[in-house]
């Protein structure tokens, strides 16, 4: 007796592995992008109508590419690029705008965007730009080396970069210019309060990109910062023999 053959399993649909955030205030243009970008295999597409909505999504979604307009209400694209490139330096930013170069003066590139496309962009060109941006990887991930040691190495090499520091306490950012710490951010804290908090974390994971786009708020030498952080850690540590 011949057994019936088993039906072949249906192919599984492609599961999105990356998230694209598109920021545009014009509903018709948003609808065009929503329909036209369906050809981006492997991407989940989320939308925002202004920079403030986009920042909220960045706080809650692991975004891999950000595409934004410039002229928008509430928070425009210029402010969005400045804030996103400072707080999420690992996210590449593409600009789509109807402004010509004489109007935007390539300011988005100076703020942190990687490319400017003129509206309305050809969808094939836009999708190629998104795929290329998605292939961008942060400069490196460091595990097993203390943050103090990394900062000393970066200081010796006079590096300018942004460190994303992750631990059980949360995620913080440390910014260096020419090897010196110039700014830091952790939750609502910025500047010295943030850097001292981050420097006390035990065995964090550290990711870095070779860019630093912030105003200087810290002017202490690295050696003094590290010494002060060590004193703070000692003060927090329970005395020997305490329960």
Image: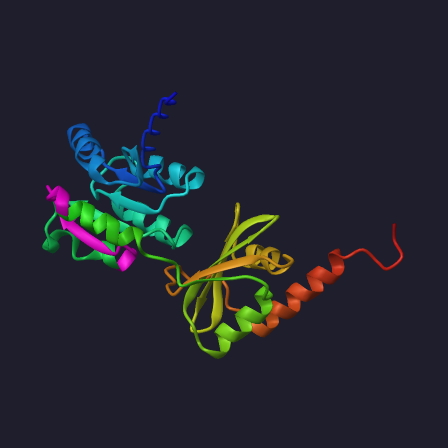
Residue 108 in the magenta stretch? The answer is no
Task: Report which quarter residue 51 is drawn in.
Answer: top left
Q: Evaluate whether residue 221 shows in this view.
A: no
Q: Evaluate whether residue 124 shows in this view.
A: yes
Q: Nearer the viewer, residue 100 or 67?
A: 67
Locate residue 29, reporting x and y percent. 16, 33
- In this rendering, is residue 20 above or below 226? above
User: At 63% from the left edge and 57% from the top edge, which residue is drawn?
Assistant: 201
Task: Report which quarter residue 22 is drawn in.
Answer: top left
Locate residue 101, reporting x and y percent. 12, 55
Give the left or right position of residue 70, taking residue 201 as reference: left
- In this rendering, is residue 34 above or below 130? above
Q: Nearer the viewer, residue 189 or 178?
A: 178
Locate residue 156, reporting x and y percent. 49, 79
Give the left or right position of residue 132, taking residue 188 as reference: left
Locate residue 62, reporting x and y percent. 41, 43
Give the left or right position of residue 10, taking residue 189 as reference: left
The number of numbered badges drawn on the structure is 0
Q: Residue furthest front?
A: 1
- In this rendering, is residue 161 above or below 153? above
User: At 18% from the left edge and 31% from the top edge, which residue is drawn?
Assistant: 35
User: At 35% from the left edge and 35% from the top edge, which residue is drawn?
Assistant: 53
Quadrant location, the N terminus: top left
Give the left or right position of residue 51, taking residue 33 as reference: right
Residue 114 in the magenta stretch? The answer is yes
Q: Residue furthest bottom?
A: 156
User: At 29% from the left edge and 34% from the top edge, which residue is drawn?
Assistant: 47
Q: Nearer the viewer, residue 85 or 235?
A: 85
Q: Which residues are magenta?
A: 110-124
Picture colour scheme: rainbow
Q: Nearer the viewer, residue 105 or 198?
A: 198
């Amino acid at each position: 007796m011949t057994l019936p053959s088993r039906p072949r399993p249906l192919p599984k649909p492609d599961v999105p592995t990356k998230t694209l955030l598109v920021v545009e205030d014009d509903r018709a243009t948003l609808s065009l992008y929503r329909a036209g970008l369906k050809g981006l295999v492997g991407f989940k597409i989320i939308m925002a109508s202004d920079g403030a909505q986009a920042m909220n999504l960045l706080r809650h979604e692991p975004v891999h590419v950000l595409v934004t307009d410039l002229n928008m209400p509430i928070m425009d694209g210029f402010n969005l690029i400045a804030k996103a490139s400072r707080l999420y330096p690992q996210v590449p930013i593409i600009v789509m705008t109807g402004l010509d170069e004489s109007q935007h003066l390539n300011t988005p590139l100076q703020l942190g965007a990687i490319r400017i496309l003129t509206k309305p962009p050809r969808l094939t060109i836009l999708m190629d730009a998104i795929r290329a941006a998605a292939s961008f990887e942060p400069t490196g991930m460091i595990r097993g080396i203390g943050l103090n040691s990394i900062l000393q190495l970066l200081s010796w090499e006079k590096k300018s970069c942004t460190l994303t520091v992750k631990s059980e306490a949360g995620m913080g950012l440390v910014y260096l210019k020419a090897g010196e710490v110039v700014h830091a951010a952790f939750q609502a804290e910025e500047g010295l309060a943030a850097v001292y908090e981050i420097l006390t974390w035990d065995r964090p994971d550290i990711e870095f990109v070779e860019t630093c786009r912030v105003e200087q708020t810290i002017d202490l030498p690295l050696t003094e910062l590290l010494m002060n952080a060590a004193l703070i850690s000692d003060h927090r540590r329970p005395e020997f023999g305490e329960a």
